[in-house]
Image (spheres, helix red, strand yellow):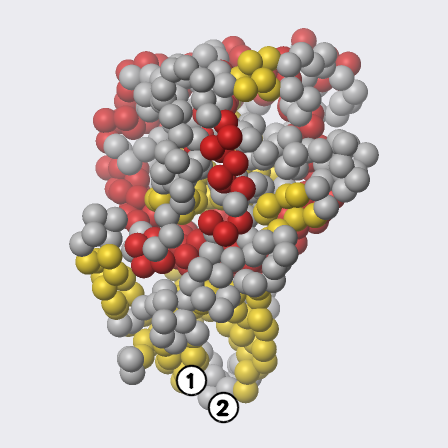
């Protein structure tokens, strides 16, 4: 297929500034994310706090800026006060397992500190009250009062200074414990935000949101001035009730730009309510793959064994890498409104890192985070991409068209170095991209780093940890103002020009 893409960069026009928090992650008390994931006191790989050293190192390498916790659905009946001081196991009504409760607020904040990430606490707006939520802020951030005293007596002399908080998780959904109507939601948000910000006015507050005007209108009209973020979620591929994950590459990448549609829809809602520029989007749960927890809504026993399907590494391949790169490109393109995103989850389930007794496996999505977090820059340069497209089968089996190539140009506002993301979505063919517009007097050298495997279904596992990895090479470019670069089939690259 002899088609080319053309990427014109206008370096004199900066579209906006990237917030590093788009490279954030999420951790929920679900299956092996916390226990046997990040927290494994019995492991020979754990540090003195019980945290897995290899996981911490991997999260540090991708500059994890922020971690959301403790859920997810789990939080909507989470009694946070039982997770500090004296610990008693209790029954987790979300996932219907016994919660050992040995990882609570103190452990979460300590884990974030070891990773170098900001803690982002999602509060219980299901069964919880404004008082519970604001007591939690007291526990974390105050020097005075009952909850600060509790923290001190638990051995934490200094306030944690947790800046990022969220009221609720998906409280619009019937699956959530303590789900709310839009009217109930507006009232709860107002009272909770008021009390939380009275405890500490420096905190930044998000609320559970969705691209639906009716859900947002009352909450934002009543409490919008007390808020900083709207939190939205998205998963675009569901495992079957038997625990089988979707495999068709084209069928999966057909959804690569659906997150962007969601961003635009929420942006319009914020605009229509007069909050564009004041509230930003925290896309604080996202992943191509939904988590496998079949029969979640049914009463009676849950088949927990089916959740083990999440841990099959062959489920996660180049389709996941391509989708992840397109998602991050969409956040970069909409940097005026997307200020945070949290890959769901960080560890195990459908996450970027898989833990086992003797180490970790870095799934293909991890390497995309490595590329983007370490090799893109803060300024988003104005650009125009002309790419051929191709037809893929959509979810419904009908053809849909996706671009062969997706690209974003970034620049370091301090050093002037440029980082161009290049995603070739095509499963079989390479594509050549003509890049124009960079100053030939300013730049001379280039390094190309590419995440790829030998096939669309390539994956990493314990016995093949590097089937998908990052290849790096220096490029000789005669004229940086107008050159061509070859992007291999099903690949994610960042071209660094300096
Ligand atoms: O499937 C995981 C769940 O997805 C999270 O707990 C919830 O927030 C979302 O609906």
For label 1, the crowd category at 10 Å Cα-Cα, with few meaning under 14, some 14 to 19 and many 20 or more, is some
CB under 8 Å between discs 2 and 1:
yes
Residue nearest the observer in this picture, 138 or 426: 426
The residue located at (49%, 90%) in the rendering is: 478
Q: Is residue 396 left or right of residue 455?
A: left
Distance from the alpha carbon under mark 2 to that under mark 1: 8 Å
The quadrant in which residue 100 appears is top right
- Residue at screen point 46% across, 25% down: 303
SS at mark 1 in the image: strand
Q: Quadrant of the C terminus?
A: bottom right
Q: Which residue is drawn at 34% across and 55% down?
A: 248
Q: State how many labels appear.
A: 2
In terms of secondary structure, where does tag 2 sit? loop
Q: Nearer the viewer, residue 281 or 222?
A: 281
Left/right of residue 104 with respect to residue 284 in the rendered view: right
Q: Residue 478 carries which label?
A: 2
Nearest the eye: 374 or 414: 374
Labels 2 and 1: the sequence-earlier one: 2
Q: Name the residue under label 1.
A: 483
Relative side of 2 to 127, left or right: left
């Amino acid at each position: 297929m002899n088609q080319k893409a053309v990427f014109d960069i206008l370096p004199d026009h900066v579209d906006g500034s990237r917030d590093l928090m788009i490279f954030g992650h999420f951790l929920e008390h679900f299956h092996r994310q916390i226990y046997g994931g990040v927290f494994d006191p019995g492991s020979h790989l754990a540090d003195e706090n019980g945290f897995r050293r290899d996981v911490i190192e991997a999260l540090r390498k991708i500059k994890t800026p922020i971690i959301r916790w403790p859920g997810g659905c789990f939080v909507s009946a989470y009694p946070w006060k039982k997770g500090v001081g004296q610990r008693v196991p209790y029954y987790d009504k979300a996932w219907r397992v016994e919660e050992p409760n040995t990882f609570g607020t103190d452990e979460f904040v300590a884990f974030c500190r070891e990773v170098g990430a900001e803690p982002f606490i999602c509060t219980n707006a299901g069964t919880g009250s404004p008082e519970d939520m604001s007591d939690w802020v007291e526990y974390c951030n105050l020097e005075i009062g009952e909850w600060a005293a509790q923290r001190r007596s638990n051995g934490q002399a200094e306030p944690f200074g947790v800046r990022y908080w969220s009221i609720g998780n998906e409280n619009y959904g019937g699956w959530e414990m303590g789900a709310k109507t839009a009217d109930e939601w507006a009232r709860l948000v107002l009272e909770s935000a008021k009390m939380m910000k009275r405890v500490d006015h420096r905190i930044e507050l998000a609320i559970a949101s969705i691209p639906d005007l009716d859900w947002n209108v009352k909450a934002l009209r009543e409490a919008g001035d007390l808020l900083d973020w709207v939190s939205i979620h998205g998963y675009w591929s569901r495992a079957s009730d038997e625990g089988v994950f979707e495999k068709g590459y084209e069928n999966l990448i057909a959804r690569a730009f659906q997150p962007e549609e969601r961003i635009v829809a929420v942006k319009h809602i914020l605009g229509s309510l007069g909050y564009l520029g004041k509230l930003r989007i925290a896309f604080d749960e996202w992943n191509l793959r939904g988590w496998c927890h079949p029969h979640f809504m049914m009463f009676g026993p849950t088949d927990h064994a089916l959740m083990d399907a999440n841990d099959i590494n062959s489920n996660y391949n180049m389709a996941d890498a391509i989708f992840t790169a397109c998602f991050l490109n969409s956040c970069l393109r909409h940097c005026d409104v997307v200020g945070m995103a949290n890959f769901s989850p960080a560890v195990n389930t459908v996450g970027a890192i898989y833990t086992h007794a003797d180490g970790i496996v870095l799934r293909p999505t991890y390497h995309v985070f490595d590329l983007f977090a370490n090799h893109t820059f803060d300024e988003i340069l104005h650009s125009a991409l002309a790419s051929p497209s191709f037809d893929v089968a959509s979810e419904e089996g009908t053809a849909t068209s996706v671009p062969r190539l997706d690209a974003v140009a970034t620049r370091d506002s301090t050093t002037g170095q440029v980082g161009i993301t290049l995603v070739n979505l095509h499963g079989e063919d390479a594509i050549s991209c003509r890049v124009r517009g960079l100053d030939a007097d300013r730049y001379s050298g280039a390094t190309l780093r590419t995440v790829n495997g030998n096939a669309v279904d390539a994956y990493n596992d314990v016995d093949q940890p590097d089937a998908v990895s990052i290849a790096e090479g220096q490029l000789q470019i005669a004229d940086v103002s107008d050159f061509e670069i070859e992007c291999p089939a099903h690949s994610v690259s960042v071209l660094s020009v300096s």
